[in-house]
Amino acid sequence: MKFDVAGARAARTYFGALGPDGLSHGYLFTGPAGVGKKHFARALAQSLLCETPKTTLLGYCDACTGCTLFRAGTHPDFVATEGTVKIGKEGGSAQHDEELTARDLVRELALHAYRSAHRVVLLGDVDFATHEAANALLKFFEEPPRGVVVLLTSSAPGTLLATIRSRFVEIGFPPLAADEVAAVLRAEGVDARRATLAADASFGSITRARAVLEGADEGIRGAAFAWFADAMTGRTPDHAFLGLDDRSQSAADKRALVSEMIEIVRIAARDWAALSMGRDVPLLAPDQRALLEGIPKRPPESAAALLAAIAETTRLASTNVSAGLVVDYLRMQLA
């Protein structure tokens, strides 16, 4: 049996100890972007739909009819969508939506499994366009038909309605270890040296590691460090690189980008505090030493308060507070 997933120790332990009778109707996987939440959810879904007998919930043979259909994206008992869920057209409407909507999902959730013991619905990076869209699904999240398992993943669980969040068993996914990220990259064909370098700069995110390899990560990483330096020295930092005025980006996309920026700022603040207090510790971003050493030192208590403020900003970024207001709050705390 296979279960090709990096990290996810808490989730592995939880599901590894469950039998079929202990499976809940819904799970919410939370954690930073790029740490394997959706990958684990898909592996769990394939495990549940695999037709080869096994002693635990986790694991799939990758050879039976269920696994073949799953890999081909044609399994009748697996439904998946990503991103913002809209309310959708009324039943019987002549108009159709290109993506699955809340009303589409209500219809999907009302169906029983065709060929498996389970019917699995995956909503990746879930966000709801309106409270109406969320409420349309609430009844089914409370009492889905027997055999239906709903899997949600979110990097900002605070944006979900409390009434929805409370209906799910929530399992956290922490950042991956650098060697886990490197192993994933090597499996994708990246040579060992480049994989190690990208993993070291990834902050535990496979998504960020891939961006490093493509050269795209240096843009936001460098811009975030420059933004931090400007804010810390009293200059007006430019956050145009976040594209918060771009109407083509969804609110969820903007929150994800701001969350990534905050993580980079947290690294910058940690390294600056270490340099400011003269601590002989390895820097998380040694290539930014010159920039950070140019920022004036502050008293230890001020540096501690700054790190606490960034932690609070991280919490705000996971709520429905707009991305722009989160960035402004962070700027004021650094100044």
Image (cartoon, rainbow, N blue to C red):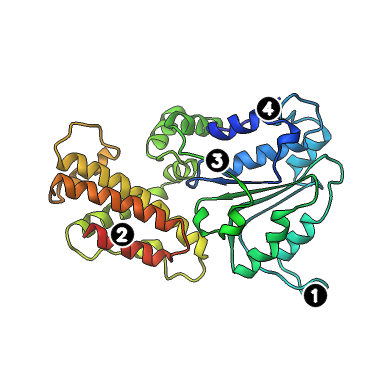
The reply to whether discs 3 and 1 touch (Cβ–Cβ < 8 Å) is no
Cβ atoms at labels 4 and 2 below 8 Å apart: no
* Mark toward the start of the polypeptide (4 vs 2): 4
- First reached walking from the N terminus: tag 3 or tag 1: 3
For mark 1, give the secondary structure: loop
Seen in the picture, residue 223 relative to 188 is either above or below; the reply is below
Indicate left or right for 145 with 11 as reference: right
Disc 1 crowd rating (10 Å Cα; few below 14, some 14-19, many 20+) is few
Image point (26%, 63%), residue name:
332
Extreme residue toward the bottom, this view: 94
Q: Identify the residue shown where x is 50% and y is 54%.
A: 156
Q: In front of the other: label 1 or label 2?
A: 2
* Vertical side of 189 occupied by 233: above or below: below
User: In x, y percent, where is residue 91?
Assistant: 80, 71
Tell me, yes or no, if residue 189 can be seen here: no
Q: Which residue carries the number 2 mark?
A: 330
- What separation in Å lies between label 1 and label 4 (alpha carbons)? 43 Å
Q: How far apart are marks 3 and 1 (CA)?
A: 37 Å
Whether pointer 2 and pointer 3 mark residues with C-beta atoms closer than 8 Å, the reply is no
Q: Label 4, on which residue?
A: 2
Q: Counting residues from the N terminus, which is met first, the one under dot 1 or under dot 4?
A: 4
Query: Is residue 31 shown above or below 127?
Result: above
Cα–Cα gap, marks 4 and 2: 44 Å
- Residue 93 image label: 1
> What is the C-alpha distance between the residues marked 1 and 2?
46 Å
Question: Foreground: 94 or 277?
Answer: 277
Residue at 50% x, 41% y is 35
Q: What residue type is labelled 2?
A: Leu
Residue 44: mark in rendering: none
For marks 4 and 3, give the CA distance: 16 Å
Instruction: Determine crowd level at label 4: few under 14, some 14-19, many 20+ residues with C-alpha closer than 10 A.
Output: few
Q: Name the residue under label 3.
A: 36
